[in-house]
Image (spheres, rainbow, N blue to C red):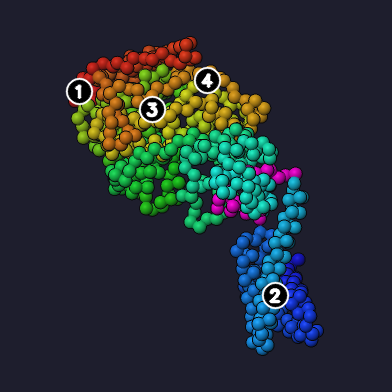
Amino acid sequence: MTKRKHVILLSLIDIAILYFTYAAVAAMMFLFESFRIKNTIIGASVVALPVAYLAICGICKINETIWRYSSEKDYLKLFFSVLGAEVAFSVLFVVRDFSLRHTMYYIISAAIGASAVVMSRILYRIIVSGNTVKNEEKLTRRLLIVGAGHSGSMMLSEILNNPHTGFNPIGFVDDDMMKYRRVIKGVKVLGTVEEIENVCRENNVDDIYIAIPSASIAQRERILNECAKTNCSVKILPYYSEFSSGDKDFLSKIRDITPEELLGREPVAVASDETYEFVGGKTALITGGGGSIGSELCRQVAAHSPGRLVIVDIYENNAYSIQQELLNKYGDKLNLEVYIASVRDKVRLEKIFEKEKPDIVFHAAAHKHVPLMEVSPMEAVKNNVFGTFNTAMAAMKSGVDRFILISTDKAVNPTNIMGATKRACEMVICYFASLNSNTTYAAVRFGNVLGSNGSVIPLFKKQIENKQDVTVTDPNIIRYFMTIPEAAQLVLTAGAMAKGGEIFVLDMGKPVKIYDLACKMISLAGLTLGKDIDIKIVGLRPGEKLYEELLMSEEGLKTTTNRKIFIGNSVSIDFELFLTRLKELREYAYSADVTNAGIEERLMCIVPTFKRAEIDNNKGGGEVSTSSEEPRIVHKSEPQMA
């Protein structure tokens, strides 16, 4: 049917409904009056009513609405348009033959007529939607909506208006007891959040949508913990702050659970406006700027008006990705340069530093994957240790104001090559800080980063999506986590607070049991552990700890003005001995007869706290604690290693 025929058909149906309404009201009100009066009233309506209806409803374009997908506003517009048309024609007859009874007749007829037209549209929508749902019954998934407020109601409307979503909303859950057992658009509130498991079991629910954008992290954690008991697929609406202005398309905003929501971590507010001020108008250079932490540093620095942002990375794909992201967001407002270069290349680095003359350097370039570095320890030494030495040297020669190293909690009493090299990097920074140069050197140490490349959550997510066994190294393994933005903020805060030689650490909050995390992710994906998917215990990897040590356990931690940030105690280092052994390590790492055992032996000489983990059977695989003693500090005035 063409649009014109559709409009004509609806108009004829509406006029017929109005004719019938006026006739029926006249028959009831004037049942015992003379037939002449009834004929006069009904006859007048035949001519004036269609004219008024076509004029007003045509101007308002009432019948151009697609009623299958109509909203409350569409029905209100229809009601008042039809009512306006009836009032317009009624005024003529009331003025001509005024009486209280005739006036009441027109008022009653107008109200009933407009309501009848609206009811015809609602009935049409119910019939059409019912047929569509019936035809697609086999494809429909049963949906439970958490939150019977505005967002949940809007989401339900979108689903009801579009049966092709494939969802059959079976009910709501909401903690507001005033809503319990009440009905929203034909869908009942079945219980509270604590009853999600029972509601899902009793109603064979397939999917759960959490529609509470105002919920806090703690509230979301509570809801997700209940949802995790159901084996339903779970998605969530983002916070209102993530919605565009005036955005009402709630269904399209539904997304997967984020790592922060999964772990129930309140975001740590580390940086403040004062923190960002020190990058404003200055040239900031970020090595490893295409990586997880490096790219987030680039984003946060770019957002606070740097004079120039310089990105150095050896991996061109990552460098290109962050370059395009920043250019698309800031365009010509951001003075940006990207270099493809390795921190191993001393000459290349010094030329870049000489040309750019950065004020601030964030050194994020590093090899970080523990198992890979166990196989190729000489590469970890070349990139991490000597890449850091080269970058720190270039910074001093070019007069950089502040140099911040990105380190890791694995540098604390390291049990693997990666951790040992990062501890050596910290010692390099301490050495340069002791030279009394114009450059302020400091390091930032934090734990596992949520969602970073190679971290556990993206790995589990990929395995679950592919219905593969989820691999957990040990059922008792625990880790501390922080978000990528938090890590980047910590680095910036350290840059603002650094006086020279500090190692900044962050209060990481509560530890997370990795096995429980895997179980929760499997449940929230709508899968049943042991039926749809299994968890495979693969054993600790070489150099991996069962329990990462608390950063707070290090003796001598000093508080700062930020209650979430601490400064590690100063350790004693014999820099003369350190440089001698560092030189021996470099010569050996680049030699033809290098071996993994030889690299490890030399690293242990440089990093006294580097000891391989020993299994403690009484703790089910936990590590024996290692010594934290180090040699005494001996200051030197000039770098001794070329």
User: Where 575 falls versus 398 (above or below)?
Assistant: above
Is label 2 or label 1 in front?
2
First of labels 1, 3 by sequence position: 3
The boundaries of the magenta stretch are 138-161
**Residue 12, image quadrant:** bottom right
Q: Amino acid at mark 2?
A: Ser
Tell me where residue 427 appears, x and y as whole percent.
30, 23
CA gap, disc 2 and disc 1 = 100 Å
Q: Residue at x 79, y 85 (%)?
A: 34
In terms of depth relative to the viewer, which is nearer, 118 or 619? 118
Pointer 3: what residue? Answer: 408
Quadrant of the rendering where the C terminus is positioned: top left
Please say if the residues under marks 3 and 4 sit with CB atoms less than 8 Å apart. no
Pointer 4: what residue? Answer: 474
Pointer 2: what residue? Answer: 109
Q: Residue at x 30, y 36 (%)?
A: 562
Q: Residue furthest top?
A: 617
CA gap, disc 1 and disc 4 = 45 Å
